[in-house]
Image (cartoon, rainbow, N blue to C red):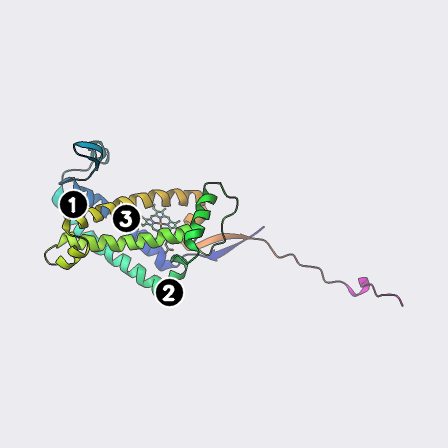
Amino acid sequence: MKKRIVKKHPLAIRWFHWINFPVLTIMIWSGLLIYWANDIYRLGWGDTTVIKFFPKSFNDALHIPFHLSTGMAFHFFFMWFFFLNGLLYVLYTIFSGEWKYLLPNRHSFKEAWLVVLHDLHIRKTAPPQDKYNAAQRIAYTSIVVMGMGSVITGVAIYKPIQFQWLCTLCGGYEAARIEHFILTLGYAVFFLVHIVQVMIAGWNNFQAMVTGFEVEKYNEPETIPEPQPDTIETPKA
Ligand code: HEM
């Protein structure tokens, strides 16, 4: 088995990806400071609560202070970086043609199951893939749509009077607030799955998102030796 170095991720994609990670972390952290001032969400019925978002232990564990104004200041400052970075990423993928590797195609939803079965070691072979497999295409496209959703619902609850039409589009102020919150929970779920997948895929895959290059193993095609003139058998008359 031979090895060669191949280009995998363009520089722009790597910048967008690694800028997004700390910015999103700050957005979630500052969002928690804001949410703590009025943490209304829970799963339950009547007076019975199964899960409260979030229990006191959660805030204690993350040392989330009751600093509403700090949270708002960070959230409304870093939202510009989140928005601009996301917008430039989408424009870049469109104009560079990278979208072809990212958007699910008509086979993706069927193949994603086969990828999951393969990851769970239930199926031996994984379906053939391009740069990303079917499950990745769906996940990466979803996260971009979720990002758009966060910006839209965020603007709706930030300026509900000025952007009343946007608020109405989201189903009203309360609905927009719930959607904004659920999207954040979605990022947490995506992040956990993403990190586990990155760890399973290994160092070579990870470092390619930093350097842009990946080490690829390949089989050298077997060369059939040319027959020498003195070894060619000529039929006897
Ligand atoms: C410590 C944090 C993170 C690590 C180590 C990480 C690692 C990676 C790696 C290695 C890839 C390439 C996967 C492959 O080639 O198979 C990737 C792609 C990607 N990651 Fe992350 N990631 C992190 C955080 C995030 C976050 C927070 C998001 C978004 C919420 C995200 C969204 C994406 C997307 C959309 C892609 C595809 C990029 C493209 O090719 O356009 N990642 N990540």
Q: Earlier in the sequence, mark 3 or mark 1?
A: 3
Q: Is residue 235 magenta?
A: yes
* Residue type indicated by callout 2: Ser
Q: Nearer the viewer, residue 217 or 91?
A: 91
Residue bounds of the magenta highlight: 227-237
Looking at the image, residue 231 sits to the left or right of residue 194; the answer is: right
Height in image: 181 above or below 228? above
Q: Secondary structure at mark 2?
A: helix
Q: Earlier in the sequence, mark 1 or mark 2?
A: 1
Q: What's the mark number on residue 22?
A: 3
**Which residue position is annotated with label 2?**
96
**Residue 123 is at least partly visible in this image:** yes
* Residue type indicated by callout 1: Gly
User: Residue drawn at (22%, 43%), measured in percent from left and top?
Assistant: 29
Q: Nearer the viewer, residue 208 or 141?
A: 141
User: Residue drawn at (35%, 66%), measured in percent from left and top?
Assistant: 95
Q: Secondary structure at mark 3?
A: helix
**Which residue position is annotated with label 1?**
71
Q: Nearer the viewer, residue 12 or 37?
A: 37
Q: Position of residue 74 (x, y in %)?
A: 17, 48
